[in-house]
Amino acid sequence: MPRSAVEGTGPAADRLTVEVRCQDRSVVVSPAGELDHDGVGLLHERLAHALAQPGADRLVLDCRRLFFCDSSGLNALLTARREAEEAGLALVLAELQPAVARVLEITGAQAVFTICPDLDSAVAR
C-alpha cells in the first residue's frame, strides 16, 4: 500500500495514522494515535475510501492503537456511523482503549455503537 494510503502528511501525520484493509467481507479501518481536530480529516478520508469498497457489508474500526479521542474525534465517529448506515454497512468498534471508551461512556455515545472486545469478534459473522 502506498504511503499516502497508510498515513497522512503534515502535522496530523505525527499524531494519527490510519490503515485500511479488507478482511473477509469487512473493511477494517485501523486508526493509531490521537483522534482530535488535527486528525479527523485523515480519518474521514480513509473512511470514505473504506465505504467505497465493493462487496463489503461491515465497517470495523480497530481501535486497539487509538489512545485519545476528543469531541471532534467523537463527532467523526458518529458521522462515520451515519455514513456507514446510509451506505448499507454495519459499523462496529473493536478493542476500545480506556480513554476512548470513557469518552463514549460519559457522552452516552456507546449506546449508538456496536462495540466488540476484539477484532476477531467484530469481523465474525
Image (tube, helix red, strand yellow):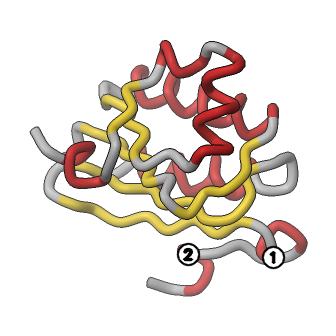
Quadrant assignment, res 8 = bottom right
Q: Which residue is mark 1?
A: 14
Q: Name the residue furthest bottom.
A: 2
Residue 123 is situated, as x and y percent measured from the top left of the image, at 22, 47
Q: Amino acid at mark 2?
A: Val
Residue in the picture at 77% in, 74% down:
13
- Measuring from the top left, give residue 95's x and y in whole percent: 42, 49
Distance from disc 2 to disc 1, alpha carbons, whole Å, reads 13 Å
Q: Is residue 121 left or right of residue 34?
A: left
> For this rendering, which residue is in front, 51 or 112?
112
Q: Residue at x 57, y 65 (%)?
A: 18
The residue under label 1 is which amino acid type?
Answer: Asp
In this rendering, does residue 41 appear at all? no
63 sits to left or right of 92: right
Is residue 52 shown above or below 14? above
Rendering quarter of residue 115: top left
- Of the image marks 2 and 1, the number of the one nearer the N terminus: 2
Q: Where is mark 2, residue-wise?
A: 6
Please tell me the numbered disc located at residue 108.
Answer: none
